[in-house]
Amino acid sequence: MDIGVTPGIDIGVDVGLDLNRDIFVIPLTPSNQTFQIHLSNVHYRITSRWNEWMERWVFDFDDVVTNTRLLYGVPIVTGCNLLGAYEYLGFIGGLVAYVEGSEEPPSYDELGVLGNVYYLTPQEATD
């Protein structure tokens, strides 16, 4: 699945990044899903699902080449690099979630509609 480019949007969170340039949107929809994607030349399988107990979207990351589960059940929240705490796993770049007009995480119906997850290149994730 391809990721889309969003030209120069202001995602409105302060994570120390200049996000007023072209950034990549992870293709999520408001339904449980699994897909494969290349990010910084690494082949991942991403699963997103609604966690009813937490009332949050969560995601899993797998390395497709080694068939290794890297992350499981990470909440999609706004205002931070979602992969920042997992640098030791060798992730290249980062992910930031943003919900248009809100600082809250995406609700059940908002993921991929008003709430998106954006991929940051390694340079953007460390700026």
Image (spheres, grey):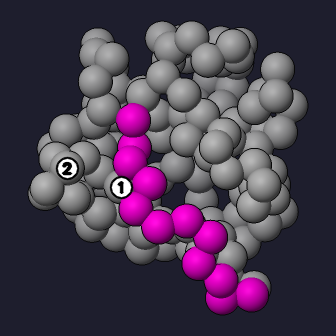
Q: Is residue 42 left or right of residue 31?
A: right
Label 1 packing within 10 angstroms: few (<14), some (14-19), many (20+): some
Residue 78: x and y, percent?
42, 28
Residue located 48% across and 11% down the image: 12
Whether residue 86 is visible here, answered yes or no, is yes
Residue 16: x and y, percent?
69, 13
Residue located 78% across and 66% down the image: 42
Residue to which mark 2 is pinned: 54
Towards the viewer: 51 or 85: 85
Location of the C terminus by quadrant is top right
> How far apart are the alpha carbons under marks 2 and 1?
9 Å
Q: Is residue 16 left or right of residue 60?
A: right
Q: Is residue 26 above or below residue 66?
A: above
Residue to which mark 1 is pinned: 58
Residue located 19% across and 38% down the image: 107
Q: Is residue 77 above or below residue 42?
A: above
Location of the N terminus by quadrant is bottom right
Q: Is residue 7 magenta?
A: no
- What's the amino acid at mark 2? Met
Residue 23: give its label: none
- What's the amino acid at mark 1? Val
Residue 88: image quadrant is: bottom right
Label 2 packing within 10 angstroms: few (<14), some (14-19), many (20+): few
- Residue range highlighted in magenta: 66-77
Residue 32: image quadrant is: bottom left
Q: Main secondary structure of the magenta part?
A: strand
Q: Secondary structure at mark 2?
A: loop
Residue 41: x and y, percent?
83, 63
Q: Is residue 107 left or right of residue 26?
A: left
